[in-house]
Amino acid sequence: KSMTIKSIFKKEQNIVVGALHFAPLPGYTGHPGMKVVLQNALKDLRAFEEGGVNGVIIENNYDIPHTEKVSKETVAAMTHLGEKLKEKTRLPIGVSVLWNDYEASLHIAKALGGKFARIPVFVDTAKTAYGTMEGKWKEVTAYQEKIKAKNVALFTDIHVKHAEIISRMNIIESAQMAIQKGADALIVTGKWTGNAPDIEELKKVRQAVKTFPIFIGSGVSEKNIKKLFQYANGVI
């Protein structure tokens, strides 16, 4: 693989990525103005740096209702904010554009020199509050090739939270397929934000994928992090 997690985070174990959720962006309810969005994001960045994280991931979490693809305004706002954050930190930056806008994620990451993009649905089909999302691994890797973003690693969820998985593969099959189709790391989540993944399920995924990088995408706390780190390389 062109991008190893070691080349991104300078380590392979016990990686902590801080999720930096922007306040609502232009066009969404509660947008406080770009100046405030940036001030808040910089405060969060400082807090993450002081806490010793190994990277951050920026996300349009509060742009409700989410859509599968975002507007040009959202891409512009996230690129602008990402560039401002990049000026202020040496941490590697990742990008997640909800709900599943892989084009926007890869494009923004490439534009600001980000190191990874999170793709919530890559090989599965998931029924969400915002419609049914189909894994488009073929399109994802083709787009990555097209815009020459091979140095942006693909962090792909398998059996993502906030969704009902309607494809037939179990989580092990999804993990194996994601690896085969070009993922650089897998993200395993609980059912909801704040819910940790099932430890037995996580253990099974680890055994199946051997040394392939796994990140935990929800529910990590000081109480369970040691346990999760037995099977996962990193947490978000």
Image (cartoon, rainbow, N blue to C red):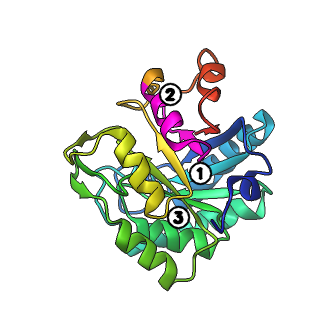
User: Residue at label 1?
Assistant: 57
Spatial separation of the CA atoms under disc 2 and disc 3: 35 Å
Question: In the visual, does 80 lie left or right of 31?
Answer: right
Q: Is 211 above or below relative to 191?
A: below
- The image position of residue 223, as x and y in percent, is 61, 14
Choose mark 2 or mark 1, whichever is in front: 2
Q: Considering the image in quadrants, where does the C terminus appear?
A: top right
Label 1: how many Cα within 10 Å (few below 14, some 14–19, many 20+): many
Q: Position of residue 211 (x, y in %)?
A: 62, 43
Residue at label 2?
203
Residue found at x 42% / y 55% = 178
- The reply to whether discs 2 and 1 touch (Cβ–Cβ < 8 Å) is no
Residue 76's place in the image compared with 174, above or below, is below
Mark identifier at residue 21: none
The quadrant in which the N terminus is found is bottom right
Disc marking residue 78 = 3
Which residues are the magenta region? 201-219
Q: Is residue 7 left or right of residue 18?
A: right
Q: Are marks 2 and 3 in contact (CB under 8 Å)?
A: no
Observer able to see residue 150: yes
Q: Amino acid at mark 1?
A: Ile
Are dots 3 and 1 in contact, CB under 8 Å? no
Residue at 50 percent of width and 59 percent of height: 183
Please report whichever mark, 2 or 3, sits nearer to the chain's N-terminal start: 3
Q: Residue at x 23, y 51 (%)?
A: 130
172 with respect to 227 (left or right): left
Indicate the secondary structure of the residue bearing disc 3.
helix
The image shows residue 55 at horizontal and vertical percentages of: 70, 48
Give, as a three-letter code, the residue at label 2: Lys
